[in-house]
Image (cartoon, rainbow, N blue to C red):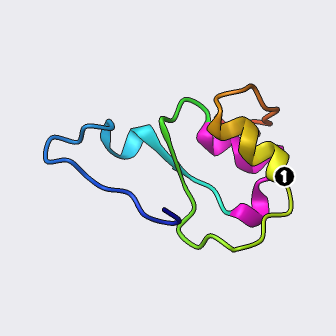
């Protein structure tokens, strides 16, 4: 289901505040991963067939902790 998500009429996932966008090319960057902090859904609208850091991806989708770096609040 690359780059796709569905909406329920009542915003069942929590709307825009519950989802984060990350590109598969930036998956290894802790600063890019910070956009997913507190999100329920991670979206890659332009997913590539090849991922350079599958270990980080596997950790994110299995809800394991990953390092992030927040630059601005």
The correct choice, above or below, for 50 with respect to 28 in the image is below
The chief SS type of the magenta part is helix
The correct choice, above or below, for 40 with respect to 45 in the image is above
Q: Residue at x 68, y 38 (%)?
A: 60
Q: Nearer the viewer, residue 45 or 16?
A: 45
**Residue 28 location (% of width, % of height):** 84, 52
Q: Residue at x 37, y 46 (%)?
A: 16
Is 30 inside the magenta-drawn segment?
yes
**Residue 14 location (% of width, % of height):** 32, 36
Q: Which residue is mark 1?
A: 28
**Residue 5 location (% of width, % of height):** 38, 57
Q: Which residues are magenta?
A: 24-36
Is 20 inside the magenta-drawn segment?
no
**Can residue 6 be seen in the rendering of this structure?**
yes
- Indicate left or right for 49 with 53 as reference: left
Q: How many marks?
A: 1
Q: Quadrant of the C terminus?
A: top right
Indicate the quadrant where residue 58 lies: top right
Q: Residue at x 15, y 40 (%)?
A: 10
């Amino acid at each position: 289901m690359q780059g796709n998500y569905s909406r329920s009429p009542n915003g069942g996932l929590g709307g825009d505040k519950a989802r984060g966008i990350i590109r598969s090319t930036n998956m290894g960057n802790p600063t890019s991963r910070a956009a997913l902090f507190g999100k329920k859904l991670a979206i890659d609208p332009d997913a590539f067939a090849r991922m350079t850091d599958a270990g980080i991806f596997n950790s994110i989708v299995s809800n394991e902790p990953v390092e992030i770096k927040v630059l601005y609040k």
